[in-house]
Image (cartoon, coloured by chain):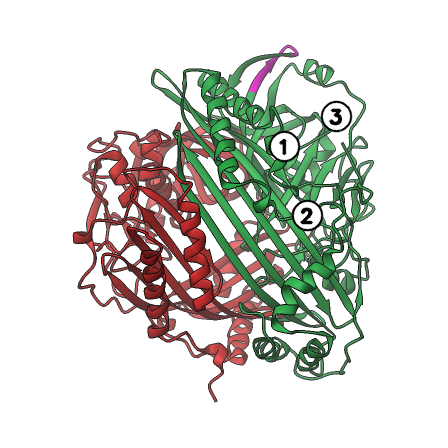
Amino acid sequence: MPDPRNELPAPGTLEAFVQQALDDARQRGADAAEAACSGDIGLSVNVRKGEIDTLEHHRGRDMGVTVYFGGRKASASAGELSEQAVRDAVQAACDIARYTSEDPANGLAPAERMAVDPPELDLDHPWPLPADEAVELARDCESAAVEADRRIENTEGAGVSVHRGLHAYGNSHGFFSVLPESRHSIHCVAVAGRGEAMQRDYWYTVARDPAALEDARDVGRRAAEHAVARLGAESLHTERVPVLFRAPVARGLVGHLVSAVRGSALYRQASFLVDSAGEQLFPAWLQMVERPHIPRALGSTAFDAEGVATAESALVRDGVLQRYVLDSYSARRLGLETTANAGGVHNLEVSGGEEDFDALLRRMGRGLVVTELMGQGVNLVTGDYSRGAAGFWVENGVIDRPVQEITIAGHLRDLFAGIRAVGSDVDRRGNIRCGSILVEEMTVAGQ
Amino acid sequence: MNEHAEAATATPDPLRQAEERLLAPAALDEARLGQVFSRLLRPGVDFADLYFQAARREAWVLEDGIVREGSHSIDRGVGVRAVSGEKTGFAYCDEIDLEALLDASSAAGAVARSGQSCTPVAFRGTAGRGLYRGDDPLASLSADEKVALLHRAEAAARAVDPRIVHVVVSLAGAHDTILVANSEGGWAGDIRPLVRLNVSVLAAAGERRESGSSGGGGRYDYQQFVEPGRVEAYAREAARQALVNLDAEEAPAGNLPVVLGPGWPGVLLHEAVGHGLEGEFNRKGTSAFTDRIGERVASPLCTVVDDGTIAQRRGSLNIDDEGHPSQCNTLIEGGVLTGYMQDRQNAGLMGMDRTGNARRESYAHLPMPRMTNTYMLAGPHDPQEIIASVDRGLYAVNFGGGQVDITSGKFVFSASEAYWIENGRIQHPVKGATLIGNGPDVLTRVSMVGNDLALDGGIGVCGKEGQSVPVGVGQPTLKVDGMTVGGTQA
């Protein structure tokens, strides 16, 4: 018997609520409106020391509507789906819109940019995994971590998460779409050593298709290897050295670029990269391309959060910034056109070289490998960068010892211009796909 | 500063109001909830609770003289939890009705397979503390008045200096009604207002641009922002920070004495010791503070508390999210570790008392031990004397966020306004830099504690395992003899 808690709403139901929101908005006098509705279901299991820690069933539904009265804008949302909730939300938005100001940059994205014929991206791969089997899989993952090394003294557990969502979006241009998507993951957090020497690290795998996940036992083993490798970590002396960002943290570095060229930061002049389109920010061999239509990829989408059709598009070509990351509002503020980035970038790929991680270590020779970054010490207004770090000290092209309780600092412009290599070890677990990044020099502070 | 309120601002029976708002519309009464608990208490389940919630929020944003955005949201639902020893089963529904509750109960209760059966106990109401009024803050000003408040703050920021080139003012309010019922007869409700006003500015001079931000709020209504001078003070402070940083020089790198200012720099305590003292990490043995109660973890000058009982503070609670009254818990007394922060499950498994620290972001999230308002008590030193004691070091007075690895104990927090001290005197401002230290020993290096305890202005948000909750921090001026400062000037 199908459990009603495991069912998504029917696509027609979501379409009806979106249509109701648009109709209600028009009846209340709005010139334009857009609405989104979604349903999500999921299961997440955490196992620790072989026993269930938490078993969570997720089932959420929500809706949001934005109304425009000329250039006045307001929005409202509700954490439920019903005719009453939609009616109330539209009314709340229309009430607020009486008090917001006329802003000529407000409005829907241009009608001619809507994704009228979206490509099929194969994003929905339901995983009908019963809770018992999810628990078994998490147990396998955790036990692989514990068995991997006798120095794994403890764990924070291993988890399996299964998720499926159905998302509908429509606007008063007549654009409407409803699409299902899935996302599943397995993770493990291992603790090595004990007392003051204790170290923790993790690994995870995430994919839309469960068949594309890494083996659960491999996830556990990698978490264990990472935790054990940190045992005995000490601080460093303060000096300027080359820094190699391991792929999972290198993605963050690219994320700072994306944040600094986002329209909302630019029109506020709150970015160190104001007016930087056309500038040589990176070495001439470096390319960054957004590829939103990769089948089954985590960041794939046929249209952005405003219904604008996405397409392959270079962000950085031969080291030169080609464009900004804009939605329709910030584009109008800047006198430009939307780049289909309402909601962010979609599979931004940084071109990797031929060198794998070990080759990058050899190229660096002596310096710091960063595997973990802590805190939010990145000032996008000035470009000043200062963050806590942990990783490994490298001598003669090989890892010498683990390090911790250090900071790395510099200016993002110098970091970008000082990139010496991007590795072939691409991490594809997110919207930014990038290998390890070797930077010429940063200030490392320690004891 | 430490106003342990005596019901001066109490609301007329928040529990009755919560019943009216959350249960009455769905015709849920004790008998029907008894049915739900019968479903939930499968053999092996030794505790279960239901968390009913209805929340309404709004936000207004003024940017460059125009009210650019307004938004409103409502969310309601029930979280259903079944606990069996160390196991927790959880499900939630976003409608409040009997059928959905029964479905969710079947799902959550399935975490237990076998064991003893327990029967629900008749409900008896728990009174919370009367730390704040339950009136709807969203209704405390008209829309016109809210807009006027935003304009007032903007005008004040622009009036400070022509170099202030961009101003964003935001006003946000939430009205949150909760009711918790559990299988041991627990029955408690709370109505939680929360407001916040923030001013962010950008200052420009020549090629340089710097930002500044200031604001505050708490568990009260918008009327407090209307008081003369309040929003003007936020605006001037945001502008002052941005202007100071226009002249900031490169920050130093290396191990240095650090003087931290009073108030918000207490984020040090939140990261360095707070998270590591949350119950579940110590039950599981993954915290750097595991099994260290009774040991010295700070200099004798340091006494640190987590206090959920301060009237109208952002991190305060009349009851925690398991219905337990909030408390003032001493975490470190005279430098010695005295206690952890607990929820019901972890306290029970560790054989300790509950501390009123069970919190959750919403009905759709599981509760866990969380901080409320965490601060260090005042010490004997004059703040001027503390600065004068430093030959060469950093004086940091404003911070962004922080982060901690509770297992290795390493934590960071990032200064956004700091000055170089030389020969006991404050010199020039330096650029923001991250400070990194080791939680279990950073407080052992606290050599001076000021007599100027201050709490932050009501701006803190704590994130843990994907759940955000409002918190407060505070401290007097204090001196740490050596910390790693992450500037660029080696």
Q: Which residues are magenta?
A: B419-424
Residues B163 and B109: in front is B163
Q: Would residue B212 be visible to someone looking at this image?
A: no
Give the percent coordinates (x, y) of residue B169. 47, 33
Q: Main secondary structure of the magenta part?
A: strand
Q: Is residue B420 magenta?
A: yes
Whether residue B353 is situated above or below residue B428 in the rendered picture: below
Helix, strand or loop at mark 1: helix
- The residue at which mark 3 appears reads as B447
> Amino acid type of disc 3?
Ser
- The residue at which mark 2 appears reads as B371
* First of labels 2, 3 by sequence position: 2
Helix, strand or loop at mark 2: loop
Mark 2 surroundings: few (<14), some (14-19) or many (≥20) residues within 10 A: many
> Amino acid type of disc 1?
Trp
Give the percent coordinates (x, y) of residue B417. 54, 24
Looking at the colours in the rendered structure, which chain would you say is drawn in red?
A: A
Q: Quadrant of the C terminus of chain A?
A: top right
Residues B445 and B340: in front is B340
- Which residue is at 40% across, 51% downward? A94
